[in-house]
């Protein structure tokens, strides 16, 4: 019988943020699965792991809650970094932007970001590569969620451990669905649980509702501000508007402009490349303060980061739109507790100019999730039928909910890990 690899959860436990898991083989080779940060009230890092013990870092995707602390391991070390080419390209944008706008000390700088990404191995999905000298292999599988995102499959000591990262088995306008065929048995599943207790509405339904409500406001002479993540969600929103024949002005600002160019250079990776190209040709790109003033002076839609109204041009636009009862702020991204977006939803106020301002504009959130919903998690787990399941990347409520669902479908060992605790899951049955 073979003893399973040791697992130590450094973050992303009963929280959405700072995802990081350390897997150590019997031979002492260590693989770090993601290394993110939390960006709610301040920057928080995962628990410590000795850098010299990290043989390789596998990055599931480009979002900062999964890659934001990875440069730390390149201050004095040089572990092998593994990610897709698109994740490498998009991570560079997000990491350098984090350094640029950080309002607190960060223990690394641009040189470490560049070392991480310049030395990273760009791996194709379903390409298997060796790590270290102990016979460990890593293979990436499409995770859905965002372009370039991967599930990470590690084979060590004869045990196959699958880390889903953030995943979505449902296609969107821009992102193909996650892979669910792993050929051989998965022994250990480490799964996110972001929306484990929620059944998302059908994408067709939410798209139609969103476009209809946007059209209503614009036809009445209003403006709709759509704060959206610069990587992925902004591109999804302009594609949705194009797909439904929206023919009013659509303005795009912030980091989303650069990411648009990257997507246009990688159209085959998109789910509906022709639609996206058409959408890009239909939008107006904001280039200056004069452009922004013009956008605020005409009916239309403004799509811009940050998705949680925490920085970016969305803050500048919201200062004006918040005052206008004819206008609207439509949230289309996950809102982390404590962010301005979450505050807007709960209390209808925004922190503007150093004080809380009552928002007079219409406010609504639309569920354009890039994660699995409740039934998706359960169906996925049934399909791969692991012996062990570790539930991460969700609130305590969602971790508890998915744990019970996993137990009900007959997974023998369902574990809700704690930060810093080492789990050696015992001999393989």
Image (cartoon, rainbow, N blue to C red):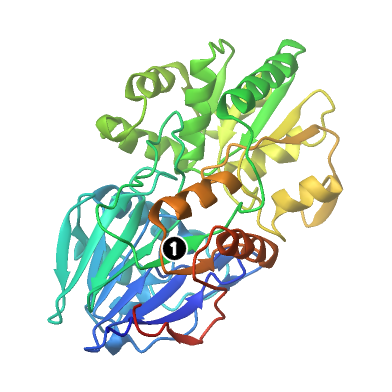
Tell me which residue sits at (82%, 34%) in the image. Answer: 323
Q: Is residue 8 left or right of residue 139?
A: right
Q: Under tag 1, what secondary structure?
A: helix
Q: Is residue 335 left or right of residue 83?
A: right
Classify 306 as above or below 30.
Answer: above
Task: Find residue 95 and report its horizontal and vertical position in percent.
Answer: 40, 60
**Closer to us: 425 or 395:** 425
Tell me which residue sits at (69%, 57%) in the image. Answer: 339
Evaluate whether residue 306 shows in this view. Answer: no
Task: Find residue 216 and report its horizontal and vertical position in percent.
Answer: 73, 15
Task: Find residue 425 and report its horizontal and vertical position in percent.
Answer: 42, 82
Classify 9 as above or below 389.
Answer: below
**Closer to us: 174 or 339:** 174
Tell me which residue sits at (44%, 42%) in the image. Answer: 169
Evaluate whether residue 271 shows in this view. Answer: yes
Q: Is residue 104 left or right of residue 89?
A: right
Disc 1 designates what residue?
A: 66
**Closer to us: 341 or 103:** 341
Q: Is residue 400 left or right of residue 276?
A: right
**Residue 331 occupies quadrant:** top right
- Tell me if mark 1 has few (under 14), some (14-19) or many (20+) residues whose alpha carbon lies within 10 angstroms of its own: many
**Closer to us: 169 or 419:** 169
Tell me which residue sits at (36%, 30%) in the image. Answer: 271
Task: Find residue 5 and report its horizontal and vertical position in percent.
Answer: 33, 81
């Amino acid at each position: 019988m073979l003893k399973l690899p040791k697992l130590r959860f450094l973050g992303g436990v009963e929280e959405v943020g700072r995802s990081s898991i350390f897997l150590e083989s019997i031979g002492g080779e260590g693989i770090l699965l993601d290394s993110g940060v939390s960006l709610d009230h301040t920057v928080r890092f995962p628990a410590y792991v000795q850098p010299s013990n990290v043989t390789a870092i596998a990055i599931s995707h480009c979002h900062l809650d999964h890659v934001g602390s990875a440069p730390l391991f390149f201050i004095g070390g040089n572990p092998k970094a593994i990610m897709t080419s698109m994740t490498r390209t998009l991570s560079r944008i997000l990491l350098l932007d984090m350094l640029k706008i950080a309002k607190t000390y960060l223990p690394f700088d641009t040189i470490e970001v560049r070392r991480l990404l310049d030395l990273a191995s760009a791996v194709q999905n379903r390409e298997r590569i060796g790590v270290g000298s102990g016979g460990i292999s890593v293979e990436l599988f499409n995770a859905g969620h965002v372009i370039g995102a991967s599930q990470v499959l590690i084979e060590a000591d004869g045990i196959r451990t699958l880390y889903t990262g953030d995943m979505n088995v449902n296609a969107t306008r821009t992102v193909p669905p996650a892979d669910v065929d792993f050929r051989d048995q998965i022994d250990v599943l480490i799964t996110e649980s972001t929306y484990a207790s929620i059944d998302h509405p059908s994408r067709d339904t939410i798209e139609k509702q969103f476009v209809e409500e946007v059209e209503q406001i614009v036809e009445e002479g209003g403006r709709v501000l759509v704060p959206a993540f610069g990587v992925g969600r902004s591109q999804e929103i302009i594609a949705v508007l194009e797909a439904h024949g929206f023919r009013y002005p659509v303005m795009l600002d912030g980091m989303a402009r650069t990411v648009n160019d990257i997507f246009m250079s990688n159209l085959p990776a998109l789910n509906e490349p022709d639609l996206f190209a058409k959408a890009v040709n239909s939008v107006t790109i904001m280039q200056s303060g004069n452009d922004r003033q013009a956008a605020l002076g005409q009916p239309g839609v403004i799509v811009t980061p940050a998705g949680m109204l925490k920085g970016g041009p969305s803050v500048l636009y919201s200062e004006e739109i918040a005052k206008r009862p004819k206008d609207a702020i439509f949230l289309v991204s996950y809102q982390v507790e404590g962010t301005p977006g979450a505050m807007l939803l709960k209390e209808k106020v925004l922190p503007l100019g150093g004080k809380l301002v009552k928002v007079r504009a219409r406010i609504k959130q639309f569920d354009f999730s890039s994660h699995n919903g409740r039934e998706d998690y359960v169906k996925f787990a049934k399909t791969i039928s692991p012996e062990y399941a570790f539930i991460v990347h969700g609130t305590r409520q969602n971790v508890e909910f998915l744990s019970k669902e996993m137990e009900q479908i007959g997974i023998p060992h369902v574990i809700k890990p704690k930060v810093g605790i080492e789990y050696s899951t015992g001999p393989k049955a």
